[in-house]
């Protein structure tokens, strides 16, 4: 299957980076290289782009798509949480812009054997973004305690039926190992009242999302990376992040705000004495959302939000 993924908020992301022709930019979630291709078009002979992705299929597809840009682009199979190490090994200490397009690609969702979707009944419970990892979604479903499953589904899926879903999963696996997306979906359906199933969207969506986030440590990786990425920016450099659900967006919003205003002095202090200085400013006081035209062409963009941070100049 061809790696296809329609880049979300493409023009808005490119514009947010204020690209310099001779600058160095990092795409931390390269995917098929849609955003990267547009960045590279705007770079001159001295400009450079580093693309990072942990998915082997994405790395292969992006390599093919971006081949025409030659030595201006370097692709590395890794997780963006290791961005500092990746750049250090390339002899790069600072960059002019970094951007992330979080979540799951259309390719990953549409390739049944990757196990990300609840719509393919016979799909294995995999969900690994980096297939070098040993643990899969099947391991989580079949070996985690009922309490751990409850916390994962509640915290990452924000599902009000999390406790009942966890209970049903544990009961079902006592009779038989849960192996496919279809089996898990039927268990989830049984845990949710029929009247809710009829009106609340696909009943398995939140649980599948929660398991994927837990397996790939998505929120932990994001939370542990933002400060590092800001450190790596040149003065005036931009960090642009596209999120797709509230938990990601909350992390980005809060960490951007903290970097803009890190002061921890009590509000009634006349002057700041904590010594914490602002590292820059939040460009997007409210997130940038997809335009109506983009939503018509790509319904999967509906939950996308773009937030931008600019590092302090001088």
Image (cartoon, helix red, strand yellow):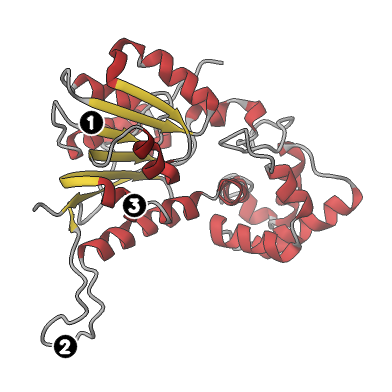
On screen, residue 191 above or below 147? above
> Residue drawn at (74%, 46%), measured in percent from left and top?
139
For the question of whether residue 201 can be seen, the reply is yes
- The foreground one among 216 and 243 is 216
Are the residues flagged by discs 3 and 2 in contact, CB closer than 8 Å?
Answer: no
Report the side of 305 relative to 193 (left or right): left
Q: Earlier in the sequence, mark 3 or mark 1?
A: 1
Q: Of helix, strand and loop, which one carries label 2?
A: loop
Residue with the mark numbered 3: 228
- Residue at image position (33%, 55%) is 227
Q: Is residue 246 left or right of residue 265?
A: right
Q: Which residue is mark 1?
A: 11
Question: In this orientation, which residue lies closer to the viewer: 146 or 201?
Answer: 146
Could you say which is closer to the camera, residue 243 or residue 163? 243
Q: Residue furthest right?
A: 175
Residue shown at the point (17%, 22%) measured from the top left: 46
Label 3 vs label 1: CA separation?
A: 25 Å
Q: Count residues near mark 1 (Cα–Cα under 10 Å), then give few for <14, some for 14-19, many for 20+.
A: few
User: In the image, is 211 to the left or to the right of 104?
Assistant: right
List the residue tagged with mark 2: 269
Q: Position of residue 20 (x, y in %)?
A: 13, 31
Residue 203 location (% of width, % of height): 63, 48
């Amino acid at each position: 299957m061809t790696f296809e993924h329609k880049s979300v908020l493409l023009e808005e992301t490119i514009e947010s980076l204020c690209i310099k022709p001779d600058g160095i930019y990092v795409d931390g979630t390269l995917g098929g290289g849609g955003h990267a291709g547009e960045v590279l078009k705007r770079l001159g002979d001295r400009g450079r782009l580093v693309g990072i992705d942990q998915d082997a299929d994405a790395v292969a597809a992006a390599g093919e798509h971006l081949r025409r840009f030659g030595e201006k682009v370097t692709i590395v199979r890794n997780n963006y949480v290791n961005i500092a190490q990746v750049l250090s090994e390339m002899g790069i200490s600072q960059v002019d812009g970094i951007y992330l397009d979080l979540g799951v690609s259309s390719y990953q969702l549409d390739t049944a054997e990757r196990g990300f979707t609840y719509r393919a009944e016979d799909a294995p419970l995999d969900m690994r973004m980096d297939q070098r990892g040993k643990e899969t979604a099947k391991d989580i479903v079949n070996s985690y305690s009922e309490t751990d499953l409850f916390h994962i589904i509640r915290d990452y899926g924000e599902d009000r039926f999390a406790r009942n879903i966890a209970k049903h999963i544990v009961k079902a696996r006592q009779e038989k190992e849960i192996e496919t997306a279809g089996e898990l979906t039927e268990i989830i359906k049984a845990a949710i009242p029929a009247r809710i199933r009829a009106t609340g969207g696909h009943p398995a969506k939140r649980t599948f999302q929660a398991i994927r986030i837990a397996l790939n440590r998505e929120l932990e990786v994001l939370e542990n990376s933002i400060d590092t990425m800001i450190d790596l920016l040149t003065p005036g450099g931009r960090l642009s992040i596209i999120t797709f659900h509230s938990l990601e967006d909350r992390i980005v919003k809060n960490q951007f705000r903290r970097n803009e205003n890190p002061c921890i002095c009590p509000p009634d202090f006349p002057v700041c004495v904590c010594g914490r200085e602002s590292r820059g400013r939040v460009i997007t006081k409210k997130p940038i959302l997809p335009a109506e035209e983009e939503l018509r062409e790509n319904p999967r963009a509906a939950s996308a939000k773009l937030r931008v941070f600019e590092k302090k100049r001088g």
